[in-house]
Amino acid sequence: MEERMLKGRAFKFGDDIDTDQIIPARYLNTSDPNELAKHCMEDADPTFASKVRKGDFIVAGKNFGCGSSREHAPLAIKAAGVSAVIAKSFARIFFRNAINIGLPILECPEAVED
């Protein structure tokens, strides 16, 4: 089996980042991934969409993706070019939605140390 190392910058977020912070409800009138990417993480970090590059990562605390069950949230992250989301834990519905759209996620309780 070939080993492969992913490289990119890490954007760190805390606990309980909900789907409204990932993609605010005011942008749910579109399902265009490129448009969603422009507003990804806007309410958690207004500069995220302008800074993130293809191959970067999101590293977060516990319960990432809590809140509503909108599939727009993992879609916005994937469209923004994020390679994977690594978190202490994920909200159950976000976890399923991410898998369903092919966004790599890794639950790693030791990933974010205070």
Image (cartoon, rainbow, N blue to C red):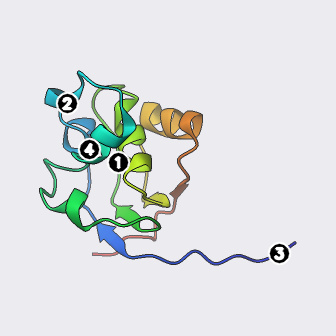
The structure residue drawn at horizontal position 38% and vertical position 38%, both measured from the top left corner, is: 33
**SS class of the residue under badge 2?**
helix
Q: Earlier in the sequence, mark 1 or mark 4?
A: 4
* Residue at the spot of label 2: 27
Q: Nearer the viewer, mark 3 or mark 1?
A: 3
Q: Nearer the viewer, mark 3 or mark 2?
A: 2
Q: Nearer the viewer, mark 1 or mark 4?
A: 4
The structure residue drawn at horizontal position 35% and vertical position 48%, both measured from the top left corner, is: 64
On-image quarter of the C terminus:
bottom left
**SS class of the residue under badge 4?**
helix
Asked if disc 3 and disc 2 are in contact, CB closer than 8 Å, the reply is no
Q: Earlier in the sequence, mark 3 or mark 2?
A: 3
Q: Is residue 102 left or right of residue 65?
A: right
Q: Earlier in the sequence, mark 2 or mark 4?
A: 4
- Say which amino acid is labelled 3: Glu
Q: Earlier in the sequence, mark 1 or mark 2?
A: 2
- Say which amino acid is labelled 1: Phe
* Residue at the spot of label 3: 2
* Residue at the spot of label 1: 64
